[in-house]
């Protein structure tokens, strides 16, 4: 506990930390006991508050940009899946009961990329026979 009932400002984080720092700055400006410290520490505290505020604003902006990028990625993925499904439906309509023929129009996907230590080249699966 600091003298005269003043509490230390060490717990706040983020925007609450800026608010607490501004409170310390106000006390520094208005407390007669702080007169000897004011000239040395007020500019340093002002600079630190401005720096923290700028960094918090940059973090918030980065979070918004990340959220927008993820939303766009999810939207593009859903659009691609929808188009792929539509194409698969068209192939099923054009070639009913001819699964082998339908499969000719689509690539085979691996569940995971090949590991670098796997031996031999990756060979595609054999093409299905006439159906």
Image (spheres, grey):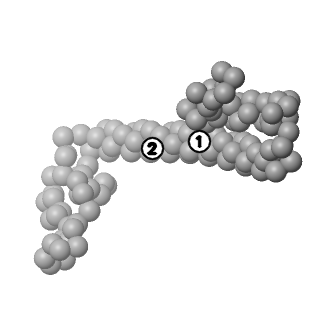
10, above or below 54, in the image: above
Disc 1 to disc 2, C-alpha distance: 21 Å
The residue pinned by badge 2 equals 77
Q: Taking 68 as reference, is 26 above or below it?
A: above
Image position of 111 (left or right of 73) = left
Q: Residue at x 63, y 29 (%)?
A: 2
Q: Quadrant of residue 66?
A: top right
Residue 63 got which mark?
A: 1
Q: In this view, does 29 lie above or below 62?
A: above
Residue depicted at 15% across the width and 65% down the height: 126
The residue closer to the viewer here, 102 or 72, is 72
**Residue 125 percent across, percent down from the top left:** 16, 64
**Closer mark to the observer between disc 1 and disc 2:** 1
Residue 94 shows up from this direction: no
Residue 17 on image: x %, y %:
64, 34
Toward the viewer: 15 or 108?
15
Residue in the image at 18% along x and 52% along y: 100
Q: 62 left or right of 95?
A: right
Q: Residue 6 carries which label?
A: none
The quadrant in which residue 19 appears is: top right
SS at mark 1 in the image:
helix
Q: Where is residue 24 in the image (x, y as percent from the top left)?
A: 74, 33
Binning the other alpha carbons within 10 Å of mark 1 as few (below 14), some (14 to 19) or many (20 upward) gives few
The picture places residue 40, in percent across and down from the top left corner, at 82, 51
Please state, as top left, top right, bottom left or bottom right, where the N terminus lies in the image. top right
Instruction: Pick out the residue farthest to the top.
Output: 5
Dot 1 or dot 2: first in sequence order is 1
Q: Quadrant of residue 87?
A: top left
Q: What element carries label 2?
A: helix
Q: Nearer the viewer, residue 109 or 20?
A: 20
In the picture provided, is 72 more to the left or to the right than 84?
A: right
């Amino acid at each position: 506990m600091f003298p005269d009932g003043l509490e230390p400002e060490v717990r706040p984080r983020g925007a609450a930390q800026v608010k607490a720092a501004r409170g310390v700055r106000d006390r520094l400006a208005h407390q007669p006991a702080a007169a000897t410290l004011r000239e040395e520490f007020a500019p340093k505290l002002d600079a630190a508050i401005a720096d923290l505020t700028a960094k918090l604003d940059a973090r918030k902006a980065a979070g918004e940009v990340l959220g927008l990028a993820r939303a766009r990625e999810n939207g593009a993925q859903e659009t691609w899946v929808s188009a792929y499904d539509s194409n698969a439906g068209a192939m099923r309509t054009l070639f009913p009961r001819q699964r082998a023929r339908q499969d000719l129009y689509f690539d085979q996907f691996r569940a995971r990329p090949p590991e670098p230590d796997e031996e031999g080249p990756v060979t595609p699966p054999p093409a299905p026979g006439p159906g």
